[in-house]
Amino acid sequence: MLALVLLLICNGFIGVIGDEKDSTDEKDYREPRVDVGKCLDFCHLKYIPYLLCKDEDDKLVKNPWETCHRGHCDKDKIKLKYVTNDGTKKRENYVPKTRVGESAYFKYLCLDRRGLPQKLKCELRDGDRKWEDDDKIRCYEPQELSSHLNLLVTEKPPDMIPQLNEILNHSNVTLKPVDISSIAEIIKNSFDIPDKEASMATHLIGISLKVMETEKETLRLSAELNATNTLLINFEDNLNALAPKLLSEIRESDPSPASNDVIKSEIYWELGVKALISSNLSVFFVNPDIANVTGISLHWNVKSSQWSYNVIYSSNQTENIRNLENLESAAFLPDKLWQEVKKKGAKYLIFKVYKQDVLFVETEEELHRRPTSVVISITISGWHEHNLPGKLPIFLRNGNTDPNLSEGGCGYWNYATWLSDGVSTLASAGSNFINNSMILCFADHLTQFTFLLGVGGRKTDTPDLHDYILDILTNVGLCLSLGGIFIIFLTAIVFSHFRRMASTKILLNFCFALAIQLIVFLVVSNVKILDQVKLKERFNIDECIFMGALMQYLLLVVFAWMLIIAFLQYKRYVTVVGVSHPDHYILMSAIVAWALPLVPTLLVVFLDGQSYIPTDPTQELPIICYPSGRGLGLGVILPIGLVTSVNTLIVGIIFWKVDQNLIQRKIKIQMRLFALQFFLLGISWIFGLCVVFGFGIVFSYLFCITTPLQGFILFLYFVAFKKDNQLAWMRLCCLKSRKNLVREPDTSDIAMDPVSQGSQNTLSSMRKIQT
C-alpha cells in the first residue's frame, strides 16, 4: 500500500494599514476613525466566515452570513428566449418566491441543450436582492409528456399519484431526464397527502416500474439533478407510511391494493403478509405478531423461468435457509433480534426486492463497484435507531462470474455510492466465499434501508503480485533513506568542520524536510499494522483533512528545497563569472522553502477541502487522507510537475556545460555528477508522473526503486564517498593519530557549495572535480 501512496503523490486577512505617526504635538493628534462597512458589501467574500460589519439595522455583527442569506426574491414574470423551428422567440415565464442564494425552476419548463431543466438564482447585487441576469438563458421546448408532468408538479392535485400512473401507462413516449425529475418531485409531494388509499402502493410500484424501463444514460443524466435518489427515498418512505394502514388488522375482508396485469396483489392473512409482486420490483408488508414471520426468501426456477417467494419464520436457522432449493436471496430477523427491536417500538417489516439496479445511479464515470444480484431494501416500521442490537442475516446468490470483476462481497447503497461498512461477508463452513454460490452477509445497521448484494470491485491495472513487490521495494528504500539521513545528521553533530560548511547547512535543511516527509508517509501508509477497527471508530473528517494537508505540505516543502538547490547548482556549474549570494541567503532560502508550499496547501484546504476525504473511509484498506480530483491535480501534481521540469532542464544544462569544459573526457566523472543531480534534484519523479498518466508498470518499478532511495544516495555522496568525512570517521573510530593519516585529495567534491569568489568560473570547478 505504501507504493500506492507514493504513486498517489504522483497520481484573507482584512485590516487597516495606517501611515507612520508624524512627530506632531499631542493636540494635533486625532484618534483614527475605523469605518465598518455594511454586511451586504461583503457577501461576495465566500471564504471569510467571520467579519465585523453592520447589518441592515446598523448593528455590529461578527458574521455576515446570516445577513447575506436573509430575505427573498419576489415572484416575478420574466421573458425568456425560446429556441423554436422558426427561430428564437420571447415568451413569458414565471419564477416563484425564492430565498437568497437558492435557485428556482421556472413555472413552465425551460430546458437546456441536454434536456435538463434550467434554474434562475436569487442573489445579492449592489446590496439588493435580485434575480440573476437571464439574458444568457436559451430555452428549448419540452415534449408534450414533459409539460404534462411539470403541470402536476406545480399544481399538486390530491390525486397526483393515480394521475401520474395513468399518464405513464398510456404514453409510449420515451422518458427524458426532465421527466424523471418531475416524477421524483411528484412522488415527493405526495408524501404529505393525508389519508392515503391502499391502492396508492400499487400506483407507486407501477410508476417505479416505468422509470426502471428508462435508458441508463437518461437515468444517469437525471441523477445529476438528484432525481433518482429523490425518487428512491420518497418511493420507499411512502410505502413505509402505508404499512400501518395495510397491516394494522389483517383479515380476509381487508382492503387490498388492486391487482393488474403487471402487478399481482396477494394476501396471506394467516401469516400476516401482504405482497405486491411484479417482474422487476416486489414489496412485502409483514406483521410478525400474527405468525412470527420475520423474513422473505426469493427463488428462481430455471425450468419454468419463474420467480417465487416464501416466508421465513424467526425460529429458522441460517444453514437451513441456505440449503433451500433454487434460493436466490433471503433476509430475516432471528427471534432474538426481533424481540429486541420490538421492545423499542418496532411493529412491522417491509421488504422491497429490486431485481434490477437501474435506480441506483452513481454519477462517477469510473465505477469501482456494481451489483451483481438483486437488491433488497429492509425497513423496520417503528424502529428509529441507527444500529441494530444484533446481526441481521442476508443471503445472496454470488453473481461474481465476470472475469473483469475482482472478489465480490456484501454492501449497501447510501444514496451516493455502494459501501460495505457494517456488513460482513461469509460463505458456508469450510469454503471460500469466492467459490461459493450462496453468500451469507451480516448487517448491523439499516443505513438508508437499502442493501447492495453481490458487490464486485473492478480490478486495478496493477496485479497483486506487483503490488507486493512494489511495497517491499518502497519500504526497503525508505528505511535506507532514513538511515542515511540519520548518519548525515550524526556526522554534522560530531564534526564541526562539516556542519560549518554552507553546503552542509543547505543539505541539513533539505534532509530535515525529507526525513519528516518520509516518516509521516511511512507511518500513515502502513496504518494496517494498527488496530483498524479502532481507527474506523475514531475516523474524523477534520483530522483527515489535517493529515492530508500535512502530507501535501511536507511533500511540497521537499520540492521547494530541491528547486532552491537546483538554482545553487546552476550558479555553481553554469554561471561563468560573478557568482555571489546575498547575506543570509540560507535563512532566506529556508523561509521560502517552508512558507511557499503553504499557498497551494491552504488553497486546497479552503477551496476543495472535501477532496481530502476518502470515498469510502470505512473500507478494509488502510485509510489514506490525501487530495484527489482537482485538489490532487492542481495542488500536488501541477507544482511537482513544474519543479521536476525546471530541475530536469537545469540538470541537462549542467551536464552539457560540464561536457564542454572538461579538459579530458572522463565518463566516470560525468556519470557521477549526473547521478548526484538525478537524485539530489528529484528527477526520478518523472517516473511517478509517467505512472499517473498510465504509461505502464515499468515506470512503477523505476519510481519505487529510485525515489525512496533519495536520502540514502545523499548519504553516500556527502558522507561515505567524501574524503574529509571518511578521514574524520576513521580518526574517531580507529583512534589513530592525525600524523599517521595523510589527507588525500578529495575526489568526491561534487557539492552544493556556491562558488565563494566571484572571479572563479565553471572551468575551475570542473578542474576541481578532476583533481
Image (spheres, rainbow, N blue to C red):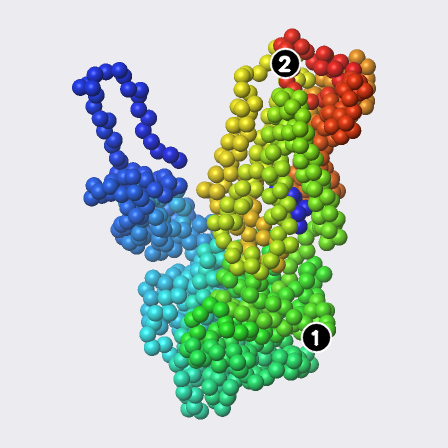
Tell me where residue 212 appears, x and y as whole percent.
53, 67
**Residue for badge 2:** 756
Q: Are marks 2 and 1 in contact (CB under 8 Å)?
A: no
Relative vertical location of residue 380 with respect to residue 409 in this rendering, above or below: below
Q: What's the residue at 71%, 71% (across, down)? A: 436
Q: What's the residue at 31%, 44% (across, down)? A: 63
Tell me where residue 120 appears, x and y as whole percent.
36, 49
Give how far apart the Cα atoms at labels 2 and 1 are: 76 Å
Q: Residues within 10 Å of mark 2 (few under 14, many from 20)?
A: few
Q: Residues within 10 Å of mark 1 (few under 14, many from 20)?
A: few
Tell me where residue 365 appears, x and y as whole percent.
58, 52
Identified by mark 1, the residue type is Ala
Tell me where residue 185 appears, x and y as whole percent.
40, 63
Q: What's the residue at 35%, 56% (across, down)? A: 108
Relative vertical location of residue 545 with respect to residue 323 in this rendering, above or below: above
Would you say 517 lies left or right of 228 here? right
The residue nearer to you, when weighing 482 against 687, is 482
Q: Earlier in the sequence, mark 2 or mark 1?
A: 1
Residue 277 visible at all: no
**Residue for badge 1:** 429
Is label 2 in a helix, a strand or a loop?
A: loop
Which of the 4 image quarters holds residue 767? top right
Identified by mark 2, the residue type is Ser
